[in-house]
Image (cartoon, rainbow, N blue to C red):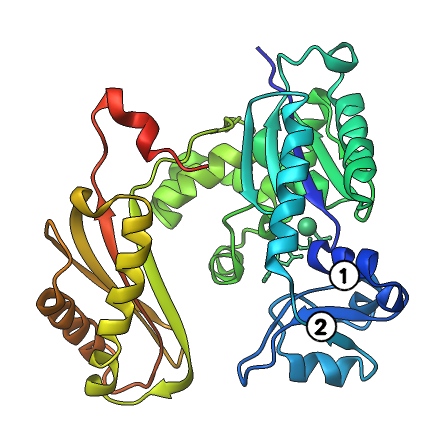
C-alpha cells in the first residue's frame, strides 16, 4: 500500500513572527539572536539570507556579512503559542502527526478523506489554513517516502510546496546529493565523499554489501534510503528513554576541578526536570557528556537507580581525562529512563 507523507515547515519561523508583529522589522534584514559572547543566531529572514546570514552563525560574523543586519531577541512563549496553533490545523486533517520542532512536522495522510485524498491539495489547504490562523507562511513537501517529504519541503521555500510522485521517487533519489538526506551531517558527508559517494546513484551502484563493508551499519541504512526501500512511518508518541541537561560555558573550563564544580548546579537542573515529569523512580542509568574546545564530544555512563553526586564525579573525571588537558566547552549530565509496564504507557508519552 502506497503511503502519503506531508512535511510542513514554517518559513524563517522566528524571524517571520517578529516581522509580523513589528512593521518596522518587515522590510529590513533581520535575525533573531542573543547577545552573549558566544551568541549565535537562531535564524534570519530571507533578506538577510541574501547576504549569507544563516542560523547558528555568530552575531559578529553575521554583522560582517551584513552591516545593516537588525538582531532582535527571540520571544519563545509566542513561538510556542503559534506552534500549538499550527498543530491544531494539522489535527483537522489527520491524527498521525509527528512534530519535529516548534515549526515543523511530518503528517501521514494516507487515509485522510479530505480533498478527495489528494495529498497535494491537503498540503495546499493546510498552508492556507496556517496562514489564516497565524498570518504566517509555511512550505510543504509531499512524497510517498517520509524523508523525501522533508527534503521536498525545502525545494520551493518560502511559501511553496514540492511534490514527488510515486513514479518520480527513483529519479529523485538518483540525483539526490547525499548531504540533503536527514542524518547525513557535514562530517559524515566528507567521509562518504572520500569513498567516492556523492549522490544516491553512487550509493545504489555500490550495492548494500559494499556499503556494509565500507561504511558499516549506517551504510546499510543509507543504502536502503537511496534505494527507496526505506518508506518510514510517522511516530506520534515519543517515549522518553533518557533525560539530560547540558550547558555551554561562556568561558571554557580549563581544569578538572572547574568542571567538577559544575556538577551541583547541573544536578539541580536535572532534578527539576525529572520531578516535573515524575521520572525519578524510573532512573536506570547515569551519564555525563563533555564537549572539548576542539568540539570533540565524549561521554561516560553507569547503570544506577537514582541520582548520585559521587557517580557523576567519577564519570566526569573519566570523561575529562580522555581530553588530555583540552579546555572544556560544554558539560552535560543525564539519566537513562526505564520503560513503563504496558498499561502505564500513557504516563511516559510526551506531548
Ligand atoms: P528551521 O525550520 O530550520 O529554520 P527557519 O524556519 O528559520 O527557516 P526556513 O524557512 O529555512 O525553514 O528552524 C525553525 C526555527 O528554529 C527557527 O526559526 C529558529 C530555530 N532555530 C534555532 O534556534 N537554531 C538553529 O540553529 C536553527 C536551524 C533553528
Ligand atoms: Mg522552518
What residue is shown at x 68% (from left), y 43% (from top)?
A: 9
Image coords of residue 300 (percent x, y): 20, 63
Q: Secondary structure at mark 1?
A: helix
Is residue 84 shown above or below 120?
Answer: below
Image location of residue 13, percent across then percent down: 71, 53
Q: How many marks?
A: 2
Can residue 170 be seen from the camera position used here?
no
The residue wearing badge 2 is 72
Q: Quadrant of residue 73?
A: bottom right
Task: Work out which quarter of the rendered image holds the N terminus and state it.
Answer: top right
Of residues 304 and 157, which is closer to you in this image? Answer: 304
User: What residue is rendered at 34% in x and 61% in y?
Assistant: 245
Q: In this view of the protein, can residue 40 be seen by the observer?
A: yes
Q: Is there CB contact under 8 Å for labels 1 and 2?
A: yes
Residue at disc 2, secondary structure: strand
The percent position of residue 78, horizontal first and vertical second, equals 65, 54
Q: CA distance from mark 1 to mark 2?
A: 8 Å
- Left or right, 28 with respect to 54, comes to right
Label drawn at residue 132 = none
Q: For residue 94, what is the image quadrant?
A: top right
Which residue does the numbered mark 1 point to in the structure image? 18
Q: Residue at coordinates 60% horizontally, 58% vertically from top-left? A: 76
Which quarter of the picture shows residue 317? bottom left
Q: Is mark 2 within 8 Å of ligand 1?
A: no
Amino acid at each position: 500500500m502506497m503511503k502519503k507523507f506531508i512535511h510542513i515547515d514554517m518559513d524563517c519561523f522566528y524571524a517571520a513572527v517578529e516581522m509580523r508583529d513589528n512593521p518596522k522589522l518587515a522590510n529590513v534584514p533581520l535575525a533573531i539572536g542573543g547577545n552573549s559572547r558566544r551568541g549565535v543566531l537562531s535564524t534570519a529572514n530571507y533578506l538577510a539570507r541574501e547576504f549569507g546570514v544563516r542560523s547558528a552563525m555568530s552575531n559578529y560574523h553575521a554583522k560582517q556579512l551584513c552591516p545593516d543586519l537588525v538582531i532582535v531577541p527571540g520571544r519563545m512563549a509566542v513561538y510556542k503559542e503559534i506552534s500549538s496553533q499550527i498543530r491544531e490545523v494539522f489535527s483537522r486533517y489527520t491524527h498521525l502527526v509527528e512534530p519535529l520542532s516548534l515549526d515543523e512536522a511530518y503528517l501521514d495522510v494516507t487515509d485522510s478523506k479530505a480533498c478527495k485524498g489528494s495529498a497535494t491539495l491537503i498540503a495546499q489547504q493546510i498552508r492556507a489554513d496556517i496562514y489564516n490562523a497565524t498570518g504566517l507562511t509555511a512550505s510543504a513537501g509531499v512524497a510517498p517516502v517520509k524523508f523525501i517529504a522533508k527534503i521536498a519541503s525545502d525545494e520551493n521555500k518560502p511559501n511553496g510546496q514540492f511534490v514527488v510522485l510515486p513514479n518520480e521517487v527513483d529519479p529523485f533519489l538518483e540525483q539526490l546529493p547525499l548531504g540533503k538526506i536527514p542524518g547525513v551531517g557535514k562530517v559524515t558527508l566528507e567521509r562518504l565523499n572520500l569513498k567516492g559517494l556523492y549522490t544516491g546513484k553512487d550509493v545504489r551502484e555500490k550495492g548494500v554489501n559494499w556499503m556494509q563493508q565500507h561504511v558499516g551499519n549506517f551504510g546499510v541504512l543509507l543504502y536502503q534510503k537511496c534505494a527507496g526501500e526505506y518508506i518510514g512511518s510517522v511516530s506520534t508518541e515519543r517515549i522518553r528513554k533518557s533525560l539530560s541537561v547540558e550547558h555551554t560555558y561562556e568561558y571554557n573550563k580549563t581544569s578538572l576541578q572547574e568542571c567538577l564544580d559544575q556538577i551541583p548546579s547541573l544536578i539541580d537542573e536535572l532534578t527539576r526536570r525529572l520531578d516535573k515529569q515524575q521520572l525519578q523512580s524510573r532512573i536506570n542509568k547515569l551519564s555525563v557528556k563533555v564537549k572539548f574546545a576542539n568540539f570533540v564530544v565524549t561521554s561516560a555512563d553507569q547503570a544506577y537507580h537514582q541520582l548520585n553526586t559521587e557517580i557523576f564525579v567519577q564519570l566526569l573525571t573519566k570523561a575529562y581525562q580522555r581530553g588530555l588537558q583540552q579546555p572544556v566547552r560544554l558539560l552535560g549530565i543525564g539519566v537513562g529512563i526505564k520503560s513503563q509496564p504496558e498499561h502505564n504507557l500513557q504516563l511516559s508519552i510526551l506531548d
